Image (tube, coloured by chain):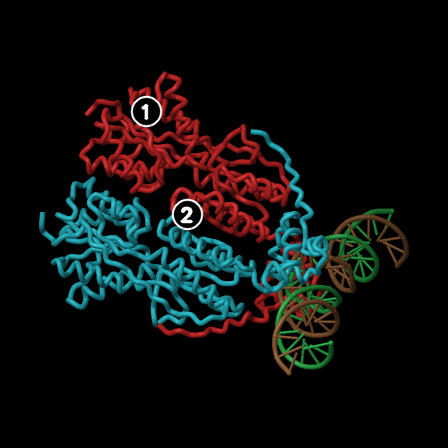
Chain colours: A red, B cyan, C green, D brown
Amino acid sequence: MKRTRLHHKRQSNQTLADIAKAASVSTATVSRFLNNPDSVRPERAERVRRAVAEMGYVPNGAARALASQRSMTMGAVIPTLDNAIFATGIEAFQRRLYESGYTLLLASFNFDLEEEVRQIAALMERRVDGMLLIGFDHRPEVYAKLDAMGVPYVCSWAFGLDQKSPCVGFDNRDAMRRLTTYLMEIGHRRFAMLAGETAHNDRARDRVLGVRDVLKSKGLDIEADAYRECAYSIRAGRLAMRALMEQSPRPTVVMCGNDVIAFGALLECQSMAIHVPGDVSITGFDDLPLASNLQPALTTLRVPATAMGLRASDHLVSRIAGNSVILQEKLDVELIIRETTAPPGRV
Amino acid sequence: MKRTRLHHKRQSNQTLADIAKAASVSTATVSRFLNNPDSVRPERAERVRRAVAEMGYVPNGAARALASQRSMTMGAVIPTLDNAIFATGIEAFQRRLYESGYTLLLASFNFDLEEEVRQIAALMERRVDGMLLIGFDHRPEVYAKLDAMGVPYVCSWAFGLDQKSPCVGFDNRDAMRRLTTYLMEIGHRRFAMLAGETAHNDRARDRVLGVRDVLKSKGLDIEADAYRECAYSIRAGRLAMRALMEQSPRPTVVMCGNDVIAFGALLECQSMAIHVPGDVSITGFDDLPLASNLQPALTTLRVPATAMGLRASDHLVSRIAGNSVILQEKLDVELIIRETTAPPGRV
DNA sequence: ATAAATAATGTAAGCGCTTTCATATAGCCT
DNA sequence: AGGCTATATGAAAGCGCTTACATTATTTAT
């Protein structure tokens, strides 16, 4: 490996003025051509077009942003990219932003809300035109700053009419209610839950609430030692599942905070020789690609990650353009019943 | 859902001049305080600090970038975020960038090199100070433009001393050589491969070459119908594996282009009642979290995704700072032997 | 103390665009 | 053709910072 001092010279780039001179027009005309080609007459437009092409002109976004007061960038601040479902959502968000002429500024905060405050501050300095957040749980100063700076934002991955924030998401609580209802209908009564960590995470919390809503309506609940929280990782899921299954009586169904935890739970059952769904049913949340491929295939809730990314982009772009938008947009979560759930006690 | 026209007023934000006036100093002093606090005397620094805090001042990055000719943003253009290994690398890249004061501009191009050209162009307009690319396969105009604009870039996920581009990556070919060597040592002779799509993808190509290097050195090769390319998805892996195993004679080992394909292959074996590794051995590439958790656990190559993200960030930041850097940095790939490989013919 | 050297500060000129406003040109109607 | 309107164009003023340079304040050395 060679070690070299590479003097990287920031080339003396072409500017608008250079193009203007080369095309014998004013800078205003070049600017107009670039932003709205039809507003300049064909003959001169052609001159400008050629000058731009020949000189390899690349507009300076900083100058543009400063003069126009719009950076044409959009920020997204997410917990982590290591969770495939966020990655999928962001992927779609970015793609759609690009189609609208925007570029994505991305930051993650690893579920640490203080870190999120800092990451958001960094994006605000870069003068993003809009911001995508995950969920509603954010430090008050986040909302304060966003409002003070007049940066439009939208919360995703969650939905709540009681929330004052614009959002494009789904109802975590209701989704879990539906899944729980289904489980009760097929006969389950002894529920356990391997929830995601609920501190500073409204999505995880809502999922737990959804389960409890239904159970309580039937006079049931999740027993204290049948409730565990764990990180969204296979390993955490395995460990928690093991601890859970070493108790007795065992639950007849274990509802997991997401598919990754459920995957871990399923693996642990296999290594403990616990039959799924014969001995215990397992459910997930997200419907990652692996869910349908597991053996047995995972019963779960399909989160509209891609649709959410697209809609969130449209929402922000529309608002910036001054168009009317649905301020609280709800997307559907689909209940996907597969093979990890069955009536209890069956073999 | 209520539909509302939300007039988002870009607040009249505080400027440097406002702070300067409030603190009774010049704008130059405020600027210095912000960029290098020690260069202004304590007593006035304090005045400025207070004004900034009280007035909730947020510097305007566009103005800053224009005046200083540095945007403090770094671009990354990747094939897709849907592949967990890229997500992991980008996660680390962003974290380290942030620590160095940079913000990440992210774009993906879905393995379409023309799309990559466009995405890169968009980032260049935003005047990123540096750029992270994946692999060496890029349209010539990408390199041309990058050089013309003097934007430092670094290719990751690959390494080659024969390449002229700066890189921080690992040697895909050599990694596969080692894995293949191991497989030959335990007795395999009939190799099959489920490669990633090699068109416009030097990493996928190098992996295939690595396998062939070793086989050819022993007078062997992958038979034409024992070689298939597929997308990096579970489903594609399953389909390809099925087609492969319906032939005879069956290979004794199937080397996959990455863990996701291998996962698909493994699942397909399970549904075809083919025993792994008894009937056939399977290998992956990446060592995703699921690799170690599969049943049987997957033999694979551990890609240093996080380390690569961190090092790539350091590389770019150093170069921009004018420091000397290792222009071609090679990271190690670890051979992880688990349970999906065994000598052939054993049960 | 005083001069010389050093450090801190202010002044003002940009950075490369967009956009208002005034002016020039083209298109239209009679 | 001539006048009127609609449309293109150019000149120039910023957008909010950084930074070279000139100036002033503070140290340090003598």
Q: In this picture, is B267 found above or below B61?
A: above
| B296 sits left or right of A34 in the view | left
| A219 sits left or right of A266 in the view | right
Asked whether residue A48 is in view, the answer is no
Residue A189 percent coordinates (x, y): 30, 20
Q: Quadrant of residue B92?
A: bottom left
- For label 1, the crowd category at 10 Å Cα-Cα, with few meaning under 14, some 14 to 19 and many 20 or more, is few
Badge 1 and badge 2 both on one subunit: yes
Residue B148 percent coordinates (x, y): 52, 70
Alpha carbon distance from label 1 to label 2: 33 Å
> Going 30% across and 62% down the picture, which residue do you hit?
B332
Residue A125 percent coordinates (x, y): 58, 52
The N terminus of chain B sits in image quarter: top right
Q: For this rendering, which residue is in front, B63 or B150?
A: B63
| A171 sits left or right of B205 in the view | right
Provide the residue designation for mark 2.
A81
Instruction: Give the residue type that dot 2 points to.
Output: Leu
Residue A59 percent coordinates (x, y): 60, 61
Q: For this rendering, which residue is in front, A45 or B302?
A: B302
Q: For this rendering, which residue is in front, A228 or A35?
A: A228
Q: Quadrant of residue A323?
A: top right
Provide the residue designation for mark 1.
A223
